[in-house]
Image: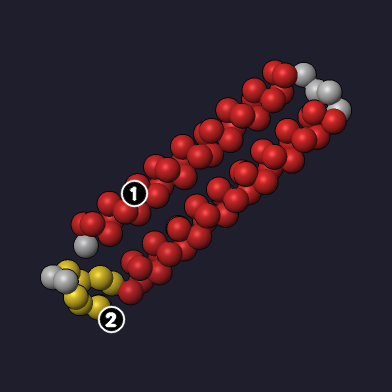
Amino acid sequence: MAKTGQGFTMNGNDEHARAREARRIAMVLGGTIVAWVAINAVGRALALPNALALVVDFAALAAFAWALVMTYRIWRARQDN
């Protein structure tokens, strides 16, 4: 079943797939933020080396970059429809 409007046709299954992908991105962002804060707090409390903090920071940046790219892909897919 296709929905029409504004000069384009959108398949309902495509929209559900994009919504699932958006939820996954939101969960990755939320999990990354929580994990980053928790690991930094534990690292500070246990006086872990700064090199570990740097690795955690880069891992968080990688997750944020992935989320940005995936969000852009969803946005472009919606523009193409």
- The amino acid on which the numbered mark 1 sits, given as a three-letter code, is Arg
Which quadrant would the N terminus be assigned to in this image? Answer: bottom left
For label 1, the residue is 73
Quarter of the image holding residue 8?
bottom left
1 lies left or right of 41: left
Q: Residue at x 40, y 49 (%)?
A: 71
For label 2, the residue is 1
Q: Position of residue 72 (x, y in %)?
A: 35, 47
- The amino acid on which the numbered mark 2 sits, given as a three-letter code, is Met
Q: Nearer the viewer, residue 34 or 74?
A: 34
Q: Position of residue 12 (x, y in %)?
A: 33, 74
34 lies left or right of 14: right
**Of helix, strand and loop, which one carries label 2?**
loop
Going from the N terminus, do you reach mark 2 or mark 1 first?
A: 2
Q: Position of residue 27 (x, y in %)?
A: 57, 54
Q: Position of residue 60 (x, y in %)?
A: 58, 35
Q: Is residue 78 above or below residue 49?
A: below
- Label 2–label 1 contact, CB within 8 A: no
Query: Of discs 2 and 1, which sits in the foreground?
Result: 1
